Amino acid sequence: MEPGREGFGTSASTGDDSTGPRDVLDASTDAAAVLAPDGTVTGWTRAACELLGFRPAEVVGRPAAALLAGPADLARAAGIAEHCRAGTGWSGLAAVRHKDGHTLEIDLRVSASFPLDGRERFLLSARRRQARWPLGRSVLDGFLTHSPIGMAVLDPDLRYLWLNETLERFGGVPRGHRLGRRMGDVLPGLPAEALEGLMRKVLTTGEPVTDYEHVGWSWADPYRRHAYSTSFFPLLDADGTVTAVCYMVLDVTERWHARRLLTLVNEAGTSIGRTLDVVRTAQELADFAVPRFADFVIVDLLEPVLSTEGHGAWLTDAGPAPARPAMRRAALASVREGAPEAAARVGDVVDFVPPPNDGTLLVSGAPVHIPYLDPADPLWLAEQPLRSERIREFGMHSLISVPMRARNTALGLATFVRSLNPLPFGPDDVLLAQELVARAAVCVDNARRYTREHTAALTLQRSLLPHALTGGTAMEVSSAYRPADPTGGVGGDWFDVIPLSGARVGLVVGDVVGHGIAAAASMGRLRTAVQTLADMELPPDELLAHLDDLVLRLGEEEGDWATRGDATFLGATCLYAVYDPVTRRCAMARAGHPPPVVVTPDGRAIYPEIPAGPPLGLGGMSFESAEVELPDDSLLGLYTNGLIDGPGHDLEAGMARLGAVLGERGPGLAALCASAVERLVPVPQPDDVALLLARTHTLGPDRVASWDIPRDPAAVGRARADVTRKIREWGLEELGLTTELIVSELVTNAIRYAEPPLRLRLLRDARLTCEVADSSSIAPRLRHARSTDEGGRGLFLVAQLAHRWGARYTEDGKIIWAEQEIP
C-alpha cells in the first residue's frame, strides 16, 4: 500500500504508537470528485478510484447518480444540491455503490458551488466511515490486563506466553510459575488433557472453539469446584499463518450451580414417588440425595402417617405440637456402607429434632440450616448426646433439616448431613433441600392417602364377599378370586353359594363394570339383592329380571353423580343356578355372562346351551332359564370373563382351555380351583378373575321319603305315624315330637285350604326338612291369634318349632316347608 493511503479501507488503529492513526480531521488523502450542476462527473481522483473501484474513464462524463446505493439517496442528493447552490456546504453520511456491487457507508462533504472555467461546479470529498476516537496502547493494555474475562496466549507447543491478571486469579497460580510451562504442569485440578486437545485442533484447523464448559478445582478456592466457559481461537500473522492460540475463560460457577440444582430437581421428579408406598417413597428420597447432595440422609415420619388405621395425619391446625413428637425412622442412606453414623435404624422409634427446636418445627417451622455443626455445642450435648458423639466421630460438619409437609398436613422431618464433602451447605442448598422434600412430601402424602383408601376398599370388599362357602351335602364347593391389581386391589367380580329349601343350593357369579371401591360397593349391593331374591325362592329367570330392575333403579339414582364426574354404577353381568340334589337337575339363567362349564365324571367338558340374555341394566328385555341333569360327582364351574379372555381375546379358545384344565382329575377341589386360575392367568391382566367350582352329590332314596295325602282329615293321623316311623329309622328320635307337630299343622292346613293333589316329603340333609306340596297358588299367612281365638296358631307354632320355614312356588302349585337342625 502506498504511503498516505492507510486511512481508506481500515476502521481503527491497532494501538501501536509507532504507527498511530491519522488525525481524523486530515483530509489530504480523501477521495475527491467534481460535479456539474446537472450531476455529471467532471473530475475523478486516484483516491476516489481506490475507494469505489471505478477508473476515471468509467465515471467522468456520466451521472454521479449511478454511484448512489438506492432511490432514497437520489431524492436526498437533489436536496443537498439546492442547499449547496444557496452558498452553504453540506457534510454527513452517505451510502454509495462499489464497483464490485457492495455498499459502502462514507463520510461525505459537499462544498458550496463555485465557478470553474466560467461554469458552476461542486467539490465532493469522501472517506470510509471510521471510529471517531483512536485506541492507544495503554488503553488496550488496560483492557486486556484488567478484563473480567481471563485471557492467555500459548505457543504451538501449548506453553504459556502471556496471561492477564483475571486468569491468574482464577487458577491461583502466579504468572511467573505459568510462563513457559504447559497447563497440565501447573493446573492439576483442570481437565488439561481435554483442553489441550481442543487447542491442538484450533492450531491444526484454524477454526475457533467457543463456549466449552468444564469443571475443575482451583488453588485460589481449593474446597469448592468451579465451572468455566472457555473459548479458543487462533492468532494469525500477516500472511495468515497460525502462530499461537489464545483462549478466553469466564467463571460460570453460579450459572453451573443453578443449572445443576435445576437438573437435580428435575431428576428428583422421576426418581422419587415411583410407588404408592410410604416407606419406599421415603427411602427413594434418601437414596436420591446420597451422594448427589449429602453424605448422610435420614427421613423420620410421624407414627400416624405410617399407620393404616384412622386418618393417618397430623393437621397443622390441630393445636400445639408435643415437644418430642412420636416418629419412626422410615429411611436412611449414607456414603459409608451400613450407615454407621446413624443413631437409629429403619423402623426404630425416634424423636429427633435439631436443638433448640421442638415439635413445633414440624408444624410451622422453617428449615434448620447449620452451616458449621459443632459437636461440642452444649445444646447438642444436653439434648442429643449420642448424636453429638457420632457427629464428632464421623466428622459431620454441616446440616439441613427440612419439615416434611403437604396439604396442610405435617408428615415428618428430613435431615441432610455432610461429612466427606468438605463444602458446607449454603443458602442455595437449603432451597434445593426444600424442593426435594416438598416433592417427596407430596408423594408420601399421596401414598398415605392411597394406602388408607386402599385398605378401606379391601376391608369393604372382604366384608362383602363370602367368608366361607358351604354347599351342604348337595355339593362340595371351592372358589378363587384374583383382582386386576396384582398387589391385592379391589374389583367388581363376586360369587356366592346360597343354601335353599329342600336341600337345594343356589350358585351365583357376577361381574360389575369397572374396578376400585365404586365397583366393590356396587358388587355388595348386587350380592345382597341376589341373596334376598334367592331367599324368596324365585326361579333363576325371575330372579335376574328383578335384579335387572334393581340395576336400572340404581343407575337412575346415581345419574346426578355422573354429571359431577363421580364414578357411577353402569351395569353388570350375572349367572344364577339352582341345583336340586334329589332330582339332580340344575336350573340356570344368565344375563350377558359366559355359560357355565360342566365336567362329567368321565372327564368330558360341556357347555350347556343357556340363552345368553342381556346384561343387567339395559331393561326391557326378558331372561330365559334352562335345566340340565347333572350326573352324580359332576363338576360345575362358574367364572367371569377375565378367566377366559386370554391373548387375542378369543373367548371360545379360553373356554376350551378352561374345560381341559378342569377335566384333569387328581387334585382336590381347592387345589384344582387354584391351579386352574394360575395356569389360565399366569400374569396380571386388566380384568378381575373369579372362579367358583362345585362338585355335585345326589341325595339318595335312603335320605328321602314321600307320601301322597288324601284330602281327608283322618289322613293327618296317618301322616304323623308315617313320619314317626321314618324318624326312628333315621335315628332322629330327638326330633320326633317336634316333627309330628310340624307335620300335623302343615298337613291340616293343606287339607283345609289347599287344592289336591297333596304330597308330604321328608328330606334328611344337613337339616331335616318337612315339605307339603299342593296345587294351590295361594300362600299361607302367619297370624298372631288373640287369646280368645280358637284357631290361627298353626303356622305360628311351626315358626316357633322350626329353624326356618317358608313357601316356594312350582309349575304345579306351591310347597310349604320347614327345617329343623339335626342334633
Image: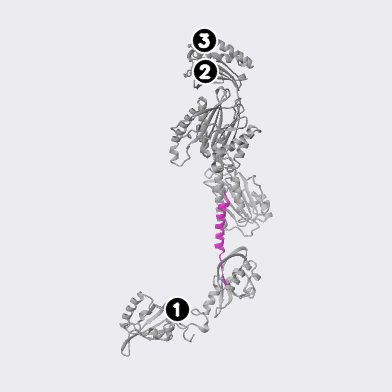
Please state which of residues 157 and 342 is positioned toward the viewer in this rendering.
157
> Could you say where residue 58 lies in the image, as x and y percent from the top left?
39, 84
Residue 269 magenta-highlighted: yes
Please state which of residues 41 and 79 is positioned toward the viewer in this rendering.
41
Q: Mark 3 belongs to which amino acid?
A: Pro
Q: Give the range drawn in magenta.
A: 246-273
Crowding near the residue tagged with mark 1, few <14, some 14–19, many ≥20 C-alpha atoms within 10 Å = some
Q: Please tell me which residue is depicted at 53% across the width and 81% down the height of the picture.
A: 16
**Residue 453 got which mark?**
none
Give SS at disc 3.
loop
Q: Mark 1 belongs to which amino acid?
A: Gln
> Could you say where residue 642 lies in the image, as x and y percent from the top left?
55, 39
Q: Name the residue under label 2.
A: 773
Q: Mark 1 points at which residue?
A: 130
* Location of residue 349 with respect to 397 vertically, above or below: above
Q: Can residue 294 be seen in this view?
A: yes
Please state which of residues 442 and 595 is positioned toward the viewer in this rendering.
595
